[in-house]
Image (tube, rainbow, N blue to C red):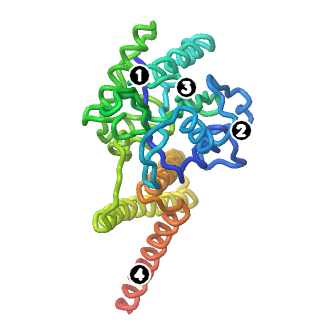
Amino acid sequence: MSYAIIRNANYKKDNLAGLYKHNERKNINYSNKDINKSNSIKNYSLKKCNTSYLNAFKTLQNQYDLKGRIISTTNILCEFVITSDKEFFEKIGEIETLRYFKTAYKFVANYQNLGEEFIVSSKIHLDETTPHMHIVFVPVVHKVDTKSGKQVSKVACSEYWKGKDSYKKLQNNFYSYMTRAGFNLERGLTGNTHIETDKLKKLTNYEVQKYEMQSINLEQEKEISDTKELNQEYKRVIRRFNTLAKQYTRIKNLTDNTTEKLEDIEIEYHNIKFENSKLKKENKSLKNYIHKSIEWASLVLNFSFERVNRLINDFIERKEKEKNEREYRNKSSKR
């Protein structure tokens, strides 16, 4: 059985340029190896954005007199990534795939009484392993002003995702909406629980699922103004990256050792070759995982991607140096 999958991420002003380039395929090269650039011509839009996402936001802000205090840490856009598994789309065919995404688009336009006018872009990617749709929208809530009695529209990500069960509510409503439209699907994964990689791959190959494994409470706007709290958050993220870096080093060493054994042990050639291939895939997955974690950390910390990446590389170099020093000391003691 296939799953109805919808995932959300929130974005601040500084992160919109990278999101725009990825979704609208404005980059020349992509770190995601699943992207087949020769197939990008097959991508299409249900709502086209003819300018940058930031400019589109500013236009909507002025046009609809959107209220809300906008500062550097404010999440001004949200993005739904909507998909299922590869086999589902292959089974239903091209026409039904288009209907699937059009149905999902209508769901987003009406969910939380948003309004289609606040959808900035809806892009369907067919140049990756699994078809999926990126819907970028302004998290607008509509309410009555207590003083004037008039209805006002406000940019308020935290209110749009109000309540600890807001993500669960989204998934329940999306599943119900899509199945009522005639799509034979099961409900997607619940909440923000950690998903084992093997189990995740059974659901979909799509890269955003990997990203969601470490994206905790993405639906809640996170505002950090206290320096002490910010330092604690920074240390927590760095500790997580240190763990990832250790895992990366371990897998890299395993891969290197396996390659050496392949050259020396002819009788075990086929078994080791299979294991080596498996390790390389794990290594590749981990690199993509680290890349997505770096992107997430840059969102949380409001750091550049390059700065966070440099912290990780410094950690790996330091560990390699410590390892070499230990090996040298061990050799010297044996003499």
Real-space CA distance between mark 2 and mark 4, rounded to the nearest whole angstrom = 45 Å
Residue type at the position of mark 3: Glu
User: Which residue is nearer to you in this view: 297 or 256?
Assistant: 297
Dot placed on the residue nearer the N-terminal end, 3 or 4: 3
Dot placed on the residue nearer the N-terminal end, 2 or 4: 2
Judging by the rendered image, the residue that carries numbered circle 3 is 117
Residue at horizontal 50%, vertical 57%? 255
Real-space CA distance between mark 2 and mark 1, rounded to the nearest whole angstrom = 36 Å
Residue at the front extreme? Answer: 148
Q: Kindly state the secondary structure of the residue where label 1 is placed.
A: helix
Determine whether 151 is above or below 194 in the image.
above
Q: Callout 3: 10 Å neighbours few (<14), some, many (20+)?
A: few
Judging by the rendered image, the residue that carries numbered circle 1 is 113
**Residue 65 placement, left or right of 193:** right
Q: Kindly state the secondary structure of the residue where label 3 is placed.
A: helix
Q: Is residue 293 visible?
A: no
Judging by the rendered image, the residue that carries numbered circle 4 is 327
Q: Callout 1: 10 Å neighbours few (<14), some, many (20+)?
A: few
Looking at the rendered structure, which numbered label has been put on residue 37? 2
The x and y percentages for residue 224 are 34, 57
Pair 2/1: label in front: 1
Q: Kindly state the secondary structure of the residue where label 4 is placed.
A: helix
Q: Kindly state the secondary structure of the residue where label 2 is placed.
A: helix
